[in-house]
């Protein structure tokens, strides 16, 4: 998609970085583990229209989605492989997902009844992945630690409208010891379920997302669900993955202000030096969260400029006093590389206080995106 000339800010998505990340992660996993590329939330804000063709070109055959909007976008992009929902769906959502060939995530015994009823009403036998609470996330899934747990699993397996093709779970922590413990319990519980089902190796087992898959080989089982790693938002393999997103704007205006002047709504900041302040024409309406007020930075002419005011709906100020050659019209990078400097996920997380995806998913969906091709 082309960035409008008049855009106050834009997002660049590097197709070559995504291709590189797929190849790199696959090499790490080996040939016996299936790679499911997760493109929920419009490919973490990177754009399914951009990402899905890259995945197809790399030979990816199964994609993870959350919403039916994501599923529809994947199909529009020409992807013909398998689609798996990575969370429990609602009744209407499940029914509509059939037209896209979505394999549903079963979130518990009662939820299995809903999925089975939708399948019966539509006259299909639905491929499903049965979630177990083996890892202790406590979000969805049957808990085999409960006295009725295996009976509940047996009931799901016996439903003629459901074809259980996968057993799944999700880790609550990016902590190696926690993953090892959870993977061990998942292994034991899924082995017991497969015996009960008489399934042999027909049922695929999967619980690892990026961190677990790359740091704890024992968590990989038959399939891994790679989200953050696909977009380069992890250091789980020593920094060899490449961030695929870059977020930029341009300085709209620069003005000098005396020491002691106040800056921003509610006189939020008082200058302790004579300063040159630059207006960046983005704000919280564009996903630039107020948590970055006074903590975040942008890059101007390859140097770091701190955000000094309370971020407004459509603008914020950065201090370019030490960047003498900064002028209106200069590019300002909020996320990604400029010159030899980078605003990385770790920088954003330190400023924001939460995971970087909490912000960049919104940036990618609110600002115009464009494809770029890096160094391969």
Image: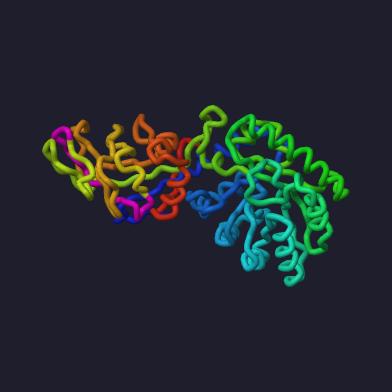
243 lies above or below 310: above
For residue 26, say whether it is visible.
yes
Outermost residue on the bottom side: it is 121
Q: Quadrant of residue 309?
A: top left
User: How many numbered discs, if any?
Assistant: 0
Residue 232 in magenta stretch = no
Residue 372 percent across, percent down from the top left: 44, 45
Whether 277 is among the magenta residues is yes
Q: Residue at x 29, y 39 (%)?
A: 294
Q: Is residue 96 found left or right of 335 in the rendered image?
A: right
- As drawn, which residue projects farthest toward the top? 238
The image quarter in which residue 332 lies: top left
Give the residue at the far left of this rendering: 258
Q: Position of residue 359 (x, y in %)?
A: 43, 47
Q: Position of residue 180 (x, y in %)?
A: 68, 32
Residue 329 visible? The answer is no
Report x, y in % for residue 233. 50, 38
Residue at far front of view: 147
Q: Nearer the viewer, residue 281 or 76?
A: 281
Q: Which residues are magenta?
A: 272-287
Please name whichever residue, 258 or 201, is drawn nearer the observer in this view of the structure. 258
Residue at 56%, 50% in the rendered image: 39
In this picture, residue 62 sits left or right of residue 70: right
In screen coordinates, is 364 left or right of 167? left
Give above or below for 238 relative to 22: above
């Amino acid at each position: 998609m082309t960035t409008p000339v008049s855009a106050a800010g834009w997002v660049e998505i590097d197709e070559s970085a995504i291709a590189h990340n797929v190849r790199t992660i696959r090499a790490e996993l080996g040939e016996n583990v299936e790679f499911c590329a997760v493109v929920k939330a419009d490919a973490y804000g990177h754009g399914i229209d951009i990402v899905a063709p890259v995945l197809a070109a790399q030979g990816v055959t199964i994609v993870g989605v959350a919403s039916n909007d994501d599923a529809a976008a994947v199909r529009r992009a020409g992807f013909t492989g398998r689609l798996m929902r990575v969370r429990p769906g609602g009744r209407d959502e499940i029914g509509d997902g059939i037209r896209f060939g979505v394999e549903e995530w079963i979130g518990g015994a009662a939820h299995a009844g809903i999925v089975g009823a939708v399948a019966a009403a539509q006259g299909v036998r639905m491929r499903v992945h049965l979630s177990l609470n083996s890892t202790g996330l406590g979000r969805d899934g049957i808990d085999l630690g409960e006295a009725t747990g295996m009976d509940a699993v047996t009931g799901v397996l016996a439903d003629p409208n459901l074809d259980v093709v996968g057993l799944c779970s999700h880790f609550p922590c990016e902590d190696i010891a926690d993953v090892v413990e959870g993977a061990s319990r998942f292994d034991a519980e899924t082995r017991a379920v497969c015996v009960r089902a008489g399934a042999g190796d027909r049922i695929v087992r999967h619980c690892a997302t990026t961190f677990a898959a790359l740091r704890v080989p024992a968590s990989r089982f038959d399939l891994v669900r790679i989200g953050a790693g696909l977009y380069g938002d992890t250091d789980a393999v020593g920094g060899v993955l490449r961030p695929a997103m870059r977020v930029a704007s341009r300085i709209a205006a620069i003005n000098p202000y005396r020491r002691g002047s106040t800056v921003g709504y509610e006189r939020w900041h008082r200058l302790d030096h004579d300063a040159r302040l630059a207006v960046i024409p983005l704000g919280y309406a564009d996903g630039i969260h107020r948590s970055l007020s006074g903590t975040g930075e942008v890059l101007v002419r390859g140097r770091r400029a701190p955000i000094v005011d309370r971020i407004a709906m459509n603008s914020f100020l950065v201090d370019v006093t030490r960047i003498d050659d900064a002028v209106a019209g200069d590019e300002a990078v909020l996320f990604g590389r400029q010159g030899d400097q980078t605003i990385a996920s770790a920088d954003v997380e330190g400023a924001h206080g939460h995971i970087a995806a909490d912000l960049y998913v919104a940036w990618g969906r609110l600002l115009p995106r464009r494809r770029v091709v890096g160094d391969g």
